[in-house]
C-alpha cells in the first residue's frame, strides 16, 4: 500500500461572482437620486425620441415606443449599468432611406432581423473587439456628438427648424439670430430656452435642499407656467395615439426578406447599430467609476431590444450618448434610473399626453444644449494638448470628422488617425552614414516600416552617391524590419550589383537572414567580381570583420 504525505491543501478557486441584481445594486445607492436621475433622462430622451422619429420619416409615436423598449427592456438587462438606449440620430438617415425604399410596414421586420443578428454576434463573442479603441478617439467622439447637438438644438430653443446637416446649421446661425430678434414669440421662446441653459449650469449652486431638485424639472415647471400665460404662443410637445402606432409584422413583410436590397439594409443596420452602441459604451465608461461594460452582454441586450422593437414595428435603437451622459451627470449609480425613464415615457405618452402638450419644446432644447456642452467638454482639448499633442490631434480629427460626416464614419476616421499615429511612433528610425576612402557605411537603428520608406530611399541614395568601391549596410540594431523596407534594400543591393564595380555588404538583424545555421547577425555579401551562389548572395555568420 502506498501512503501520501500530508500537506497543505490547495484551495479550490471560487467561481466568479455573478453580477449583482438590481436589488443588490440599490443597496449601495440612493433611491431618491436614482428617481431624480431617471426623470432628467426622461426629459432629455423625450424630445430626442420625437425628433429622431420625425427625421427618420416615421410617426413620432414610434420613436417613443423605441425609447420605452430601451428603458423597460434593455434598461433591466446587464451589460452597461449606466448606458441608456433609444432611437439614435446616427441611424436616422438610414431609417429614412429604408422607409422611402421599402415602406414603413417593412421597417419592423428589418429591425427584427437586425436584433436577431446582434444576438448571434454577441453569442459568438465579437463584442469585446470594440474595447480596442483609443481614449483620444472616445473623447473626440463625445465632442463630435456634443458640438452638433448644441448647434442643432439652438434652433429649437428659438422655436425654429434646423436647416439640416451640422455644417448647414452652423452657417445658418447668424440668420437664426436675426429672425429671432425680429419675431416676438421666437424671442420669448429663446429667452425661456436660454434661462433653461443657465439654470442647468448654475442650479447646483442653489442653497440647501433646492440644489437636490433637478434643474431640468425646475425649468420644465417654469416653462409650463410661461407657456400658459395669455398672449404667449410658443411650441409645445404633441404626441398622438401610442398604441395605434404599433404595427406587428405580418406574412407580407416576412416575404420581403427575399429582396437582396432588404438584406443589405439589415446588414447595414446591424453593423452601424452594434458599432454605435459599443463605441458609446466605451465613452460612457470614461464618465464614471462604477462597473465597467461587459461588451458581449451589452451587445446581447441591444439585440434583444431591437428584436422587441422590430416586433412592435418601431424604430431601431442603440445606446445614446446624450441620454447616457445625462444619466451619469444626474448621479445615477444603478440600472434603476434608466429603467424608470422608460416607465415615465410609457406613463406620460399613454396616460398623460395632455400633460406633455403643456411642456415647451424650447425648454427641452435647452436641456439638450447643456448636455451637448458637457459632451463637447472643450477643457479636454486643452488638457490633452498639454499631455500629448499627437493624441490631441487625433481627438480633433475625430471631432471634425463626425461633425462633417456622421457618427460611424467619423469614428472610423478617428480610428484610422489613431492607428497612423501609433505606426509613426512605433516606426522611429535613425539613419547614420560614415565614409572613408574605401567604404561608405550606413547604420540604421530603430524600427523600419513602410512609413519610413522615403527616409530609407534618401539614405540609400546618399550611400550610393558616396562613390566608394565598398558599401556596408549595418542593420543589426533594427528592432523590426518589415517586408516593404527589406524589399527596398534587396532591390538597392541588386541594382548596385549590376554595375559590376561596387562591393556591397549587408549585416542583417538576428534571425533576419536566410542562412539556416546563423544564430546571430548575418552578413550578406554581394560582389560584382564573381559570386559563389547562383543568385549572387553569399551568406555567412558575422565573424566580426
Image (cartoon, grey):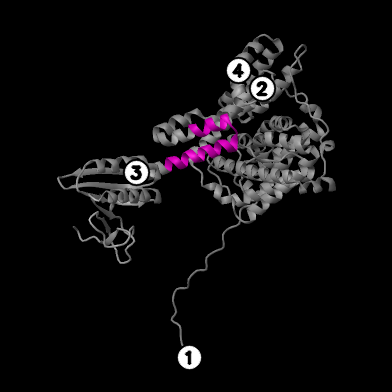
Q: Which mark is residue 162?
A: 2
Disc 1 or disc 4, which is closer to the eye? 4
Taking depth in this image into account, of 320 and 176 the one nearest to the observer is 176
Identify residue for label 3. Answer: 428
Residue 210: % across, % down: 62, 27
**Left or right: residue 52 compared with residue 430:** right
> Do the residues bearing badges 1 and 3 touch, measured as CB atoms within 8 Å?
no
Q: Which mark is residue 1?
A: 1
Residue 523: % across, % down: 26, 58
Q: CA distance from mark 1 to mark 4?
A: 93 Å
Outermost residue toward the left in this view: 437
Q: Report crowding for label 4: few under 14, some 14 to 19, many 20 or more residues within 10 A (C-alpha).
A: some
Whichever of labels 3 and 2 marks the residue nearer the N terminus, that label is: 2
Whichever of labels 1 and 4 marks the residue nearer the N terminus, that label is: 1
Element under label 4?
Answer: helix
Outermost residue toward the bottom in this view: 1
Disc 4 or disc 3, which is closer to the eye? 3
Q: Residue at x 75, y 25 (%)?
A: 237
**Left or right: residue 130 compared with residue 113:** left
Span shown in magenta: 396-422
Disc 2 or disc 1, which is closer to the eye? 2
Whichever of labels 4 and 3 marks the residue nearer the N terminus, that label is: 4
Q: CA distance from mark 2 to mark 4?
A: 9 Å
Q: Which mark is residue 173?
A: 4
Element under label 2?
Answer: loop
Q: CA distance from mark 3 to mark 2?
A: 48 Å
Amino acid at each position: 500500500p502506498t501512503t501520501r504525505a500530508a500537506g497543505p491543501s490547495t484551495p479550490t478557486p471560487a467561481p466568479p461572482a455573478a453580477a449583482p441584481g438590481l436589488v443588490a445594486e440599490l443597496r449601495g445607492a440612493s433611491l431618491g437620486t436614482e428617481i431624480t436621475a431617471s426623470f432628467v433622462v426622461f426629459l432629455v430622451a423625450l424630445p430626442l425620441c420625437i425628433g429622431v422619429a420625425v427625421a427618420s420619416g416615421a410617426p413620432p409615436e414610434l420613436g417613443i415606443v423605441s425609447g420605452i423598449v430601451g428603458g423597460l427592456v434593455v434598461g433591466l438587462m446587464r451589460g452597461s449599468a449606466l448606458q441608456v438606449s433609444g432611437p439614435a440620430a446616427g441611424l436616422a438617415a438610414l431609417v429614412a432611406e429604408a422607409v422611402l425604399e421599402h415602406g414603413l410596414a417593412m421597417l419592423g421586420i428589418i429591425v427584427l432581423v437586425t436584433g436577431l443578428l446582434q444576438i448571434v454576434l454577441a453569442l459568438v463573442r465579437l463584442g469585446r473587439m470594440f474595447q480596442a479603441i483609443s481614449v483620444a478617439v472616445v473623447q473626440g467622439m463625445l465632442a463630435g456628438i456634443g458640438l452638433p447637438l448644441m448647434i442643432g438644438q439652438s434652433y429649437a430653443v428659438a422655436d425654429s427648424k434646423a436647416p439640416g446637416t451640422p455644417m448647414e446649421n452652423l452657417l445658418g446661425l447668424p440668420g437664426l439670430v436675426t429672425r429671432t430678434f425680429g419675431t416676438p414669440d421666437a424671442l420669448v421662446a429663446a429667452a425661456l430656452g436660454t434661462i433653461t441653459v443657465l439654470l442647468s449650469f448654475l442650479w447646483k449652486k442653489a442653497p440647501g435642499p433646492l440644489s437636490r431638485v433637478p434643474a431640468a424639472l425646475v425649468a420644465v415647471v417654469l416653462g409650463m407656467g410661461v407657456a400658459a400665460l395669455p398672449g404667449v404662443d410658443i411650441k409645445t410637445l404633441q404626441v398622438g395615439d401610442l398604441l395605434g402606432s404599433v404595427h406587428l409584422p405580418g406574412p407580407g413583410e416576412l416575404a420581403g426578406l427575399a429582396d437582396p436590397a432588404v438584406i443589405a439594409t439589415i446588414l447595414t443596420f446591424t453593423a452601424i447599430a452594434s458599432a454605435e452602441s459599443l463605441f458609446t459604451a466605451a465613452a460612457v465608461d470614461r464618465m464614471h467609476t462604477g462597473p465597467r461594460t461587459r461588451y458581449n452582454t451589452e451587445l446581447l441586450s441591444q439585440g434583444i431590444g431591437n428584436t422587441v422593437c422590430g416586433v412592435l414595428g418601431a424604430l431601431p435603437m442603440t445606446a445614446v450618448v446624450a441620454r447616457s451622459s445625462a444619466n451619469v451627470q444626474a448621479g445615477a449609480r444603478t440600472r434603476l434610473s434608466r429603467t424608470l425613464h422608460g416607465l415615465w415615457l410609457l406613463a406620460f405618452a399613454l396616460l398623460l399626453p395632455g400633460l406633455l402638450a403643456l411642456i415647451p419644446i424650447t425648454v427641452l432644447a435647452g436641456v439638450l444644449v447643456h448636455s451637448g456642452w458637457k459632451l463637447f467638454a472643450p477643457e479636454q482639448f486643452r488638457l490633452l494638448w498639454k499631455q500629448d499633442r499627437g493624441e490631441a490631434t487625433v481627438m480633433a480629427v475625430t471631432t471634425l470628422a463626425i461633425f462633417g460626416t456622421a457618427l460611424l464614419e467619423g469614428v472610423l476616421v478617428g480610428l484610422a488617425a489613431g492607428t497612423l499615429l501609433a505606426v509613426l511612433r512605433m516606426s522611429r528610425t535613425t539613419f547614420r552614414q560614415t565614409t572613408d576612402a574605401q567604404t561608405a557605411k550606413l547604420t540604421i537603428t530603430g524600427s523600419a516600416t513602410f512609413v519610413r520608406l522615403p527616409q530609407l530611399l534618401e539614405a540609400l541614395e546618399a550611400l550610393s552617391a558616396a562613390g566608394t568601391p565598398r558599401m556596408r549596410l549595418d542593420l543589426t540594431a533594427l528592432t523590426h524590419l518589415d517586408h516593404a523596407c527589406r524589399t527596398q534594400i534587396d532591390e538597392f543591393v541588386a541594382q548596385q550589383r549590376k554595375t559590376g564595380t561596387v562591393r556591397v555588404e549587408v549585416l542583417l538583424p538576428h534571425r533576419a537572414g536566410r542562412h539556416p545555421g546563423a544564430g546571430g547577425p548575418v552578413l550578406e555579401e554581394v560582389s560584382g567580381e564573381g559570386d559563389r551562389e547562383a543568385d549572387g548572395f553569399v551568406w555567412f555568420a558575422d565573424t566580426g570583420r
